[in-house]
Image: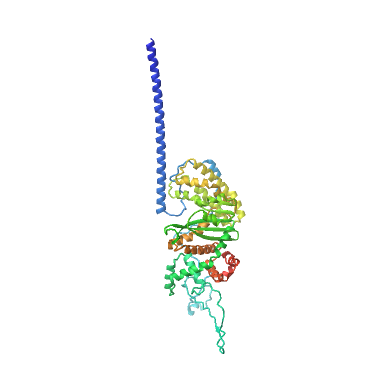
Amino acid sequence: MKTKAKSKNTSVAELNDLVAQLQQEKETQALEVQKQKSEALKWQDKYNILLERFKLAQQKRFGSSSEKCPEQAELFDEADAPVSEEVLEANSKTITVPAHERKAKGQPKRAVIPEHFERERIEYDIPEEDKICNCGCQKHRIGEEVSEQLEVIPPQFRVSQHVRPKYACKACEEGVSIAPMPKVFLPKSMAGPSLVAYTIINKYEDHLPLYRQEAIWNRHGCRLPRNSLCGWLMAAFEQTQPLLPLLKEAIVNSGYTQADETTAQVMKEPGRRNQKKSFMWVYRGNAPNYTAILYDYQETREAKHPKDFLSGFKGFLQTDGYSGYDWVNDEAFIIHLACMAHARRPFAKLMKLSKSTGQSDVAIKLIAELYQIESKAREQQLTHKQRYELRQNESKPLLNALKIWLDKMALSSSPKSVFGKGITYMLKRWAELTNFLKDGRLEIDNNMAENSIRPFAVGRKNWMFKGSPRGAKAGACFYSLIATCKANDIDPFKYLNYLFMNIPHCNTEEDYRKLLPYNIEPELLA
């Protein structure tokens, strides 16, 4: 009996061990399955990211570069859940855009010829016999029909002769008298102020390299070698250099500055290979009564360059998301503004690829409504105070809705995808993106600075590189003056012509300051 009981107890123990072993194997298999599922999701995530990058590369190479997107949404959104009621409620306030009439196809609107153009009247009258009516009475003129055609007169050269009569005594043949030569812009040069100004406008505003200008002048029967043109530009740069510190001072004192940078290819830089990229920085000072723009050529993109340039600046500084501006956040007297256009860009790229409704559509629509509010402020020509109040009433609720959506999407989106990077970018810089609410004179984006630097980027495609650092600095000088003119609604050619006529007479810093574009009375330029 004892043997049987012992055998029975041993059998139960073995069964318990077997159950425990099977349970352990089950848990191990469950962990392995979970691991495989996690690995599969990881590879699926990588596949989606690579596919997304491939599609974006295809779009960049073969598609339209415009960021205007159709009413479509994200193909690769990780979070396809519908927007929460909380977000929808916060976004319940909509902005309506006034309707407009579409022009009928095949009926282009004819350009209007400006009224200030000189007009030559050519009249075609009927013969005298046709002015007698069939009834025998004389016809009277009751009106006229006028059609206009625009003609062009090619550039004309005019030579200014500076004549100084000489006087002497015939009796003693001594004491020759002659009037002193007045100060001229380029002494001992055949180029007058208007020709130098015209050459600068052609190169830096119309993007015509000097060799093309040489060919154009040859076609008009005047030989102007490109080395002469280059010499005039460099001499003009030497004379206008004193204006640059004054533009920098105006930007630092403006209280609201925007900054941006782009690459430049410059040859013969000391200690650097010609293939190395240099940079052209641009700073736009937006003061209440003037706008000053300055290009600053530097060899690198290091943060020390804007930090040195803006030394002593107090107020609002607006930039893109480049980390070289992050030092601003540690400055006590500078409030950093980010660019909403840059924040929108990842979602706009993805919208081009989408064929079904997704989450990028939400970001694009909310940001579009913010821009509609900005457009309304411009169209109604609101004051800074009125624009501040409009943003508090209409823009702030939209931003609150956008923040709720960003927080929700951050929980379910892959941080390595374009969509996830867009979410991370906005959340990381949310304070900077919403700082434009603090003052009515601030802009929602950095587009004005980007527009200021765009002429340099266009010209860069024409001449590819600058021949030397000195040439790069000269280009920066003329770009600065032309951009400042355009920002203050001043004709750049008229300004440069006036500047070159008057700058030889400057002796003090105040004399140079009076020649800054926004300090010249418009009637003087006329």
Protein image colouring? rainbow
Image quadrant where one finds the N terminus: top left
Q: Is residue 132 above or below residue 392?
A: below
- Point 53% across, 41% down: residue: 85
Foreground of the two, 65 or 261: 261
Residue 255 image position (x, y, % from top left): 59, 56
Residue at the farthest bottom position? 171
* Left or right of 28 on screen, residue 437: right
Residue 478 image position (x, y, % from top left): 51, 64
Count of numbered circles in the view? 0
Residue 83 visible at all: no
Foreground of the two, 402 or 502: 502
* Left or right of 36 on screen, residue 100: right
Foreground of the two, 90 or 289: 289
Q: Is residue 251 above or below residue 85?
A: below
Residue 338 image position (x, y, % from top left): 53, 51
Residue at the farthest right position? 385
Residue 33 image position (x, y, % from top left): 40, 33
- Point 45% across, 71% down: residue: 228
Residue 435 visible at all: yes
Foreground of the two, 228 or 128: 228
Image quadrant where one finds the C terminus: bottom right
